Image (tube, grey):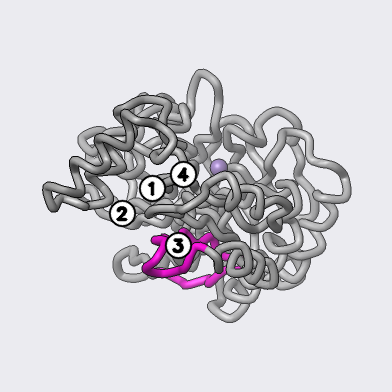
């Protein structure tokens, strides 16, 4: 028995469906070439609870080759797509909004879809005993013992139903297929392997790095292999220090050059700028795929303010012309710096 685990597709996300569907096509290709029996989706298949009909149809069309080859598709809802698709059992696609146990020969799948009062809690209720050779659980929840998961989901206010390492360790599963955190993580808790595959296509600057699917092989023992999915449009954060990576007068042109690229860019602009207002004005009408994180020190404003100027000169005189020190000091002189 072979399973492929993906998660958090977020189909229906503004302007991204084409990329997500192309990545999904890649996933379907992996299922067929690897002889996968079941494709698992651990929540947030759709970005909203009631996706437009066209989005659902586009999804079904892409996964059609799976149906033709008898590959089952089991999806649970996440916090994004709960509440409109329950019972959407169509053409071999099983979409669950309530806990359930499915049996496929020697494999049992325990489903814990996202629920405002359940999910992680249902998973931990206990009473579960091993009754099959392979026991796999699907859950849309927050594994808080990983600092990256904790900080990112915490930052976004999405720490639904936290699960800890100790709790997971005692579960009677061979594999815990997780959804909710958007970056790939694969680890082991005692005898239980655990994995967040993350999104199949990056959807924000918090999703840099390659996208993955996890191939779960029910062999002598259960094994999990990573499958690299690459991505259609990457999110890239690039630091530009004025006078180092880029000259001040080149900034507008260099930013516009990024327009022709398919990826998304966040340019962190640091260093000293001779005239911040002028540079800012020249950045109007930036392409949609480019964001500027403006962290420069505007010498024009320093010049115009006796307090800032005094501080600036003092630091420079003392031979401590470190930009970070200057930047921090100027920031502390509140409101004086962009
Ligand atoms: Mn999600």
Quarter of the image for residue 33 reads bottom right
322 to the left or right of 337? left
Spatial CA distance of label 1 from label 3 is: 35 Å
First-in-chain label (1 vs 2): 1
Residue at 76% x, 41% y: name it: 88
The answer to whether residue 29 is magenta is: no
Pointer 1 or 4: first along the chain: 1
Q: Secondary structure at mark 3?
A: strand
Label 4 element class: helix
Return the disc, 1 or 3, that comes first in the chain's sequence.
1
Which residue in the protein does label 3 denote?
238
Q: Which mark is residue 176?
A: 1
Q: Is residue 43 left or right of residue 309?
A: right
- Disc 2 target residue: 193
On whether ligand 1 comes within 8 Å of the CB at mark 2, the answer is no
Number of the front mark, 4 or 3:
4
């Amino acid at each position: 028995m072979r399973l492929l685990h993906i998660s958090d597709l977020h189909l229906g996300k503004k302007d991204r469906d084409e990329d997500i569907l192309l990545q999904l096509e890649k996933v379907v290709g992996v299922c067929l070439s690897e002889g996968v029996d079941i494709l698992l989706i651990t929540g947030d298949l759709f970005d909203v609870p009631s996706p437009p009909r066209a989005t659902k149809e586009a999804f079904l069309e892409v996964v059609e080759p799976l149906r033709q080859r008898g590959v089952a598709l089991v999806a649970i809802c996440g916090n994004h797509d709960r509440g409109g698709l329950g019972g959407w059992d169509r053409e071999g696609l099983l979409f669950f909004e309530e806990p359930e146990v499915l049996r496929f020969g020697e494999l049992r799948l325990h489903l814990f879809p996202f629920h405002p009062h359940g999910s992680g809690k249902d998973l931990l209720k206990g009473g579960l005993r091993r009754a099959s050779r392979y026991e796999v659980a699907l859950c849309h929840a927050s594994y808080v013992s990983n600092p990256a998961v904790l900080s990112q989901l915490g930052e976004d206010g999405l720490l639904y139903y936290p699960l800890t390492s100790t709790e997971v360790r005692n579960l009677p599963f061979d594999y815990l297929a997780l959804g909710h955190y958007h970056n790939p993580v694969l680890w082991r808790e005692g005898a239980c392997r655990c994995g967040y595959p993350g999104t199949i296509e990056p959807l924000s600057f918090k999703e840099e790095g390659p996208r993955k699917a996890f191939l779960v092989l029910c062999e002598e023992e259960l094994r999990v292999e990573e499958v690299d999915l690459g991505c259609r449009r990457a999110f890239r954060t690039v630091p530009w220090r004025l006078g180092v990576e880029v000259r001040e007068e080149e900034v507008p042109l260099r930013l516009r050059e990024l327009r022709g690229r398919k990826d998304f860019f966040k340019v962190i602009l640091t260093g000293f700028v001779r005239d911040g207002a002028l540079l800012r004005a020249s950045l109007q009408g930036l392409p949609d795929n480019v964001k500027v994180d403006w962290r420069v020190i505007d010498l024009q404003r320093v010049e115009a303010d006796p307090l800032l100027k005094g501080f600036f000169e003092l630091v420079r005189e003392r031979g401590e012309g470190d930009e970070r020190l200057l930047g921090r000091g100027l920031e502390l002189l509140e409101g004086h710096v962009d």
